[in-house]
Image (cartoon, rainbow, N blue to C red):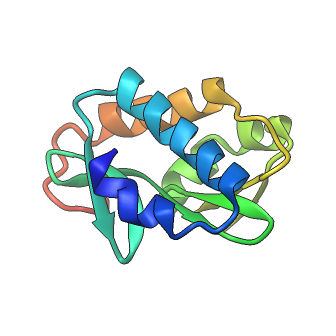
Amino acid sequence: MDVFTDYLNNIADLEHRDKLKFLFVWITNNYPTLEKKIKWKQPMFVEHGTFIIGFSVAKQHIAVAVENLVLAHFLSEIDQSGYDHTKGIIKIKWTDQFNFDLLKLLIDYNIDTKKSCQTFWR
């Protein structure tokens, strides 16, 4: 977690900090080849220099950043999860449970479809 330590330490609410750290540990354990990066002051996971998934925090939620194409592709699953969303962002309320099946779909899709991607964004 060392790459994300400063980011996490700046989250004042300890419960929020622990919840986001739990998510980062889950991703790291399930996707050990993903690199942890801070870009645009936000924690992100990348593979071979291309964006896979990113995060930021707000007062009411964790914002999960995905490319618009990915959000559109999984819109039904996102809606079924009960998460709100906007352009390129899935909002997980601090009171919500993580839908790890959905997160796995998003990450796996990006890893698979961006194997030959030579840029950070599609």
Q: Position of residue 92 (x, y in %)?
A: 74, 51
Residue at 55 percent of width and 65 percent of height: 56
User: In the rendered image, which quarter is residue 80 located in?
Assistant: top right
Q: Is residue 77 above or below residue 7?
A: above
Q: Is residue 18 left or right of residue 110?
A: right
Q: Position of residue 97 (x, y in %)?
A: 78, 35
Q: Is residue 65 left or right of residue 83?
A: left
User: In the rendered image, which quarter is residue 54 located in?
Assistant: bottom left
Residue at 54 percent of width and 29 percent of height: 105
Q: Position of residue 8 (x, y in %)?
A: 48, 59
Q: Is residue 9 left or right of residue 11?
A: left
Residue at 86 percent of width and 42 percent of height: 82
Quadrant in which the N terminus appears: top left
User: In the rendered image, which quarter is residue 116 located in?
Assistant: top left
Quadrant in which the C terminus appears: bottom left
Q: Please tell me which residue lies in front, 54 or 50.
A: 54
Q: Is residue 11 above or below residue 93?
A: below
